[in-house]
Amino acid sequence: MRDTVIKDKGTQKHVEAFVSKLRRRQVVGSHATAIETVLLLRQVISTARFNTLDQLVTIVKAAGRQIIEAQPKEHSIGNIVRKVLRLIREEFNAAATAAGATSSPTSTPPARATQLPPPTPASAVVPPSSSLSNFVLLGHPRSNQSLAVEQASQGHPRQGSGHGEHSEEFKAMSVKPALIDAIKDVIDELETVYDGVAKNARDHIHADEIILTIGKSRTVEAFLKSAAHYRKFTVIVAETAPSFSGRDMAQSLSASGISTVLVPDSCVYALMSRVNKVILGAHAVLANGGVFAISGSLIAAAAARAHATPVVICTGQYKFTPLWNLYHEYAAVDFGDPAQVLAAKDSEGIDMDKVDIVNPYYDYVKPELVDVLITNEGDHPPSYVYRVVKEAYDEEDSDL
């Protein structure tokens, strides 16, 4: 399958190299994998030879499946593949519409048929308005004049069979520049996603508020730093053990002049009564409005619900996935090294055969625990995510 679909050997080598990086966890995170995926798909399309829309879709899907199978828990990979497939269909439809508008005459002069040579007996049997199928059914050969009548009725000259095949290929290949430009727009969107989410931060954070966040999210970090230009507020950052990424987050916010308090994860519930808003990042947003977020987010969201504190998710819209039932699958959540939770030196005297040590990277936060999702394309309630997903991807690409 791989050898027959992706013809260019150099492109296939790039696909395999990216697959190897994903399996070795050399490329990690929704944003990094999304950027690498769209760059790779741009190369696949630029080197592909195709005559029809279906051929190009098959090539892109083949490359997308290889990438997704390498790291199925990076849901942004599948989202980018679906987005590119939708762009392909849109560009082909636009090209077909433009070609139809160019080939169809604005007005059909009634005297056009009179410019043809006098009808032969064969053509006289079938008037110009007759279709080719009816003409064949009558048992007459397709004379040159009947062909000319058909050409006139269609409003455009007919190419020879051999030249028509090359013309069809040329029309399909002519979509490639417009498609590359459309993919460039996707790349620009991904590169500016943090600024897009943070542009309306001052409308969501007010003066003297106390904000709680978990771990380090580049989207949340940009959001808080943008709001700090207009408001003074305090941020409580949970350490997020065992990765302790919250320490890096607290240091970064403090360096930007934001009042920051670093606390252990066990203090989240005790401090929630003082918190005005919980702001979390997201690894993936499911079609039902549920969110995969960094481990510890579920505890924070549940504590916020108990204290009637709003929970805000800051995320790029490219993380919205049409999948919705992943939280039923145990393998849907990625896991880290168990030694980070319980090192070997600390396990003396413990029967490890009877202990399962779990170190999940992400929690699943149910949609009823989320109040609003702030994206680079606007704000959405969890109940509206399915609509955004339906508008962003084609239904036939839901299962790649």
Image: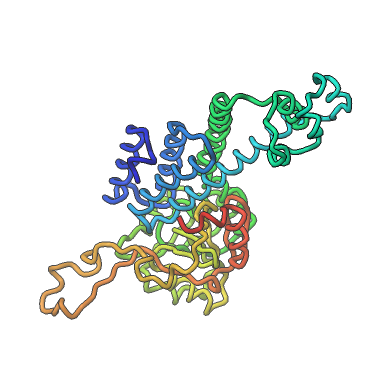
Q: Is the residue 318 above or below the residue 266 in the image?
A: above
- Residue drawn at 78 percent across, 37 percent down: 130
Q: Is the residue 221 above or below the residue 331 in the image?
A: above
Quadrant of residue 39 within the rendered picture:
top left
**Position of residue 190 measured from the top left corner of the image (x, y, whole percent):** 50, 44
- Residue drawn at 56 percent across, 57 percent down: 395
**Position of residue 25 measured from the top left corner of the image (x, y, whole percent):** 29, 51
| Colouring convention used in this rendered image of the protein | rainbow
- Residue drawn at 48 percent across, 76 percent down: 303
Q: In this view, does 113 lie to the left or right of 376?
A: right
Quadrant of residue 310 within the rendered picture:
bottom right
**Position of residue 88 measured from the top left corner of the image (x, y, whole percent):** 55, 41
**Position of residue 280 measured from the top left corner of the image (x, y, whole percent):** 49, 62
- Residue drawn at 54 percent across, 78 percent down: 307
- The C terminus lies in which quarter of the figure? bottom left
Asked whether 186 or 363 is in front, the reply is: 186
